[in-house]
Image (spheres, rainbow, N blue to C red):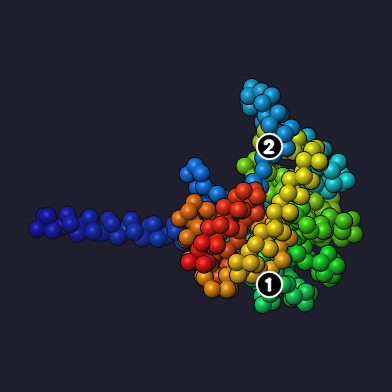
Amino acid sequence: MHKELENTHKELENTHKELDSIRWEGNVRRVEPYVPGEQPKKPGIIKLNTNECPYPPAPGVREKLSQMDADQFRLYPDTSAGALAEALCEYYHISQDQLFIGVGSDDVLAMAFLTFFNSEKPIYFPDITYSFYDVWAQLYRIPYETKTLTGDFKIRKEDYLEENGGIIIPNPNAPTGILEELEVLEEIIGANPGSVVIIDEAYVDFGGRSCLELIGKYDNLLVVQTFSKSRSMAGMRIGFAMGNPKLISYLNDAKFSFNSYTMNMPSIVLGAEAVKDTAYFQETVGKIIATRERVKMELKKLGFSFPDSKGNFIFASHEKVAAKEIFAALKEKGIFVRFWDRQRIDNHLRITVGTEEEMDIMLAHLKEIVEA
Ligand code: PMP
C-alpha cells in the first residue's frame, strides 16, 4: 500500500512538472528559424551554396590584419564604426547621417523590420525570395502577405500599390537573380509614402543599378547592402543601410536600445580597408560577371534553363533530370549547391558562381550526371 501511494505521488509530481512546462511554454516566443546554407568543413570541397565570393578580400585587408594589435581588443569598439563609416560615405558620396552599419545585412534587415514594420497592416514581399523575411515577420509578429511572382519569376508592380505596412524587395531577387528596372521600383517607392520600402541590394554589384540614387528624393526608401558577396568578407559580418537621415536616426534608436557595441573592432578596421581598394573591387566583380556569363552558355548546352541572373549565382533547372537528384549527385562529388524542397522552386538549383576552375569541375560533373 505504501509503495502504491509513493508511485501515485510520483506520477502526480510528474504531471505537475509537465503542466508547469506547458504553462511556461505558453509564454515562449516561438519561431521557426531560418535555415542557413551548410558550411561543410571537409577539405577539397567546392562550395557553391551560400553565394560567397570565391576570391580573397582586397590585399590591404590582409596587410592591415597582420598589423593588428590584439591589445586593442581590451577596449570596446567604436559604436559609430567611424573608420568604416568614413570609407563608405566617401565611396557612396553620402553623409554619415544617411548611413547605418550592422553585423551583416541580416542584422541591418532585422533591425529595419523591428523599427519600420510596426503597423497593423501587412507588409508585402514576393512569395519566392530571401527566406529570412517571413522568419523576421514571425519573430516580431508583423502581419505579412507574400505577393506571387509571375510564372517567369517577375514581380507584378500592381501588387505593391495597395495599402500596406511596409515593403521589402530584393534587387536582384534571390534566389532567382532577376533584376527589376529602377523605374518600376521608383514607382512602387513613390506610390507608398505612408510606409517604408526596403530594397535589399545584397547582389546589386554584379550588374544591377542601385536605388541609392533615389534616397535624396524619397524619405521612405531604405537601401541595404552587404560586404558578404562582392567584397569577399562574409566572415567579417558587415552590412549597411543608406537612406534619409530621419530613417537612419530611427534605426539607430532601435539599435542602441538593443545592443550598442555590435560592430567588432577588426570588422570596422578591415571593412574600411576593403572599401578603399576600388580597383580590386571592380576587378573581382568583373571576373565573377564574366564567369557567370560563360557558365550560363555552358549550362544551356547541357539542357539547363534559368532566369537571366544579375547576381553571383544562377537559378537553374534541367529539362530532364530532377534538381533534387542533381543536388545529391553533386554533393556526392564534394560540390555543394543550394536546393530547396519547396513548392514552385523544388526543381531548381541555386549555383553560386565560383572561380573558373571550380566552374569547370562542376560543369564536367553536371555533364556526367545529366548524360548518364
Ligand atoms: N539579403 C539577401 C537577399 C541575401 O541573399 C543574403 C545572404 N544570405 C542576405 C541579405 C544577408 O547577407 P549578410 O547577412 O551576409 O550580409
Quarter of the image where one finds residue 295: bottom right
State the quadrant of the N terminus: bottom left
Closer to us: 297 or 209: 297
Q: Amino acid at mark 2?
A: Ser
* Occupied quadrant, residue 291: bottom right
Q: Amino acid at mark 1?
A: Phe
Callout count = 2
For disc 1, the marked residue is 153
- Image marks 1 and 2: residues in contact by CB distance under 8 Å: no
Left or right placement of residue 176 versus residue 334 in this view: right
Left or right of 13? Residue 316 is right
Q: Quadrant of residue 15?
A: bottom left
**Closer-to-camera residue (146/26):** 146
What residue do we see at 76% from left, 50% from top?
A: 286
Where is residue 298? Give x, y as percent.
Answer: 65, 62
Q: From the Cβ of disc 1, is ligand 1 less than 8 Å away? A: no
- Number of the label disc, if any, that sits on residue 145: none
Q: Position of residue 301 (x, y in %)?
A: 64, 67
Residue density around tag 1, few if under 14, some if 14–19, many if 20 or more, within 10 Å: some
SS label for mark 1: loop
**Toward the viewer: 271 or 280?**
280
Q: Position of residue 183 (x, y in %)?
A: 85, 67
Q: Is residue 114 visible?
A: no
Residue position marked by numbered label 2 in the rendering:
267
In this image, 8 relative to 267: left or right?
left
Q: Kindly report which numbered mark, 1 or 2, lies closer to the viewer in this rendering.
A: 1
Q: Residue at x 56, y 50 (%)?
A: 47
Q: How far, Cα to Cα, is label 1 from label 2?
A: 36 Å
N-term mark: 1 or 2: 1
